[in-house]
Amino acid sequence: MDQTAPPVAPAPAPVRPKLPLGGFIQRFADRFGWKLSPVNQRRLARFKAHKLGYRSFLIFMGLFLVTLFAEFIANDRPLIASYKGEILFPVLVDYPEEKFGGFLAVTDYKTPDIQKEIQDNGWMIWPPIRYSYDTINKDYPGRVGTGDICLGYPAPPPWASSMTLCDAPEDQVARYKAFGNMNWLGLDNQGRDVLARVIYGFRVSVLFGILLTVISSVIGVFAGAVQGYFGGKTDLIFQRILEIWNSIPELFVLLIISSMFIPGFWTLLGILLIFSWTSLVGVVRAEFLRGRNLEYVRAARALGLSDWQIMYKHLLPNAMVATLTFLPFKLSGGIAALTALDFLGLGMPPGSASLGELLLQGKKHLEAPWLGISGFVAVSIILSLAIFMGEAVRDALDPRKTFKQAK
């Protein structure tokens, strides 16, 4: 009797264990269907293993997301109001004062008459801090100094001063002492809430640094890729242009432009962008010079891929590993540059929310240490978090540590 051997089931394909990434980064990637390669998974795991850098990243993102919605945290307008049965959103819409019985084009909700009118005919929900970055606290009665002189601005935080308040109407003192009206970090030299200016200044600084980093990196990577891949005369011409460009004194250009135009957010971004894109050219150029003659690039060229396809699909991913290491440090450099320009008076227009302007006030008013301390602490937190994130990114992209972890 002929017996046949039973069919042998094929061996199951080896299942690659999933690294224990966890966290919102992995959930965010899974949400949008992004699949990380094993190498990138090891890099992400290495980034999370750097406790200080990863926690700094979480704190930085948390502070940035909070300040991104600063209007809902610190504002001199109610979030929601009900007036005569109508639901209003003053934080989003500019209602004329005639709607509440006044005559101004824009309603000042801090005015006692407007507050009484709305409260008599409805209700209001205020943000935790009832001041914007440019709101002047008109209810501050002043504090009695030496010689029974009533001192004005700048004003210390209520919890940090033992001086008595000057004589003022009871309703004014009651409004000043209200919980939402309390100036937790004091008032600056124009009577504006320091905490509100720190929140808005944090957002402006981080947005400026991120935009400067992203745009300058895109330009620098593109210029370095072209210069390194094509080489020859292209590389020679680009190198001479970079030498001339880097010899231009950046500060003098800022002085000239600030004397001709009123500096603003986009003006400063454009000026700094002119000079900051050159910092990544050398790194990307070296990577493309090294990789353009490797075997896999020659094979791709033999298969008929165009130069731009080879640059984008094969050489750029390798160059980005070295480039990403510099991005957190470029972010901190952009934030520090804006702060320095504001401190020198060459930055944002007067009245804008700026940490550098707050430091300048602290320098001018040494009798008000809360101004300089608030600005210094805010800038120190931003730069420290960016530096710690940069160290974590550097360790995560280090090939020796990444592949050592995989063994």
Image (cartoon, rainbow, N blue to C red):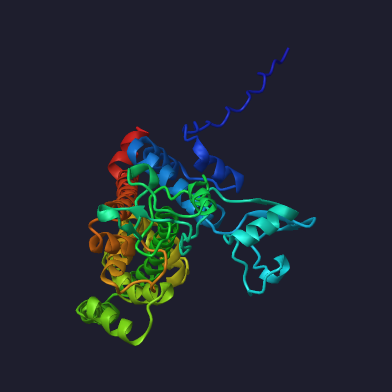
Left/right placement of residue 304 relative to residue 30 reads left
- Where residue 384 appears, as percent x and y from the top left, is 30, 48
- Quarter of the image holding residue 194? bottom left
- Where residue 258 appears, as percent x and y from the top left, is 32, 81
Residue 301 drawn above or below residue 325: below
Quadrant of the image containing the N terminus:
top right
Which residue ends up furthest to the bottom in the rendered image?
260
Which residue ends up furthest to the top in the rendered image?
1
Left/right placement of residue 255 relative to residue 121 reads left
Q: Residue at x 38, y 65 (%)?
A: 190
Which of the pair 15/381 is nearer the observer?
A: 381
- Where residue 325 appears, as percent x and y from the top left, is 32, 53
Q: Residue at x 26, y 67 (%)?
A: 282
- Quarter of the image holding residue 162? top left
- Quarter of the image holding residue 314? bottom left
Which of the pair 227/394 is nearer the observer?
A: 394
- Where residue 17 appears, as percent x and y from the top left, is 49, 31
Which of the pair 330/201 is nearer the observer?
A: 201
Left/right placement of residue 119 relative to residue 361 reads right
Residue 283 drawn above or below residue 248: above
Residue 287 visible in the shown view: no
Residue 267 drawn above or below residue 168: below
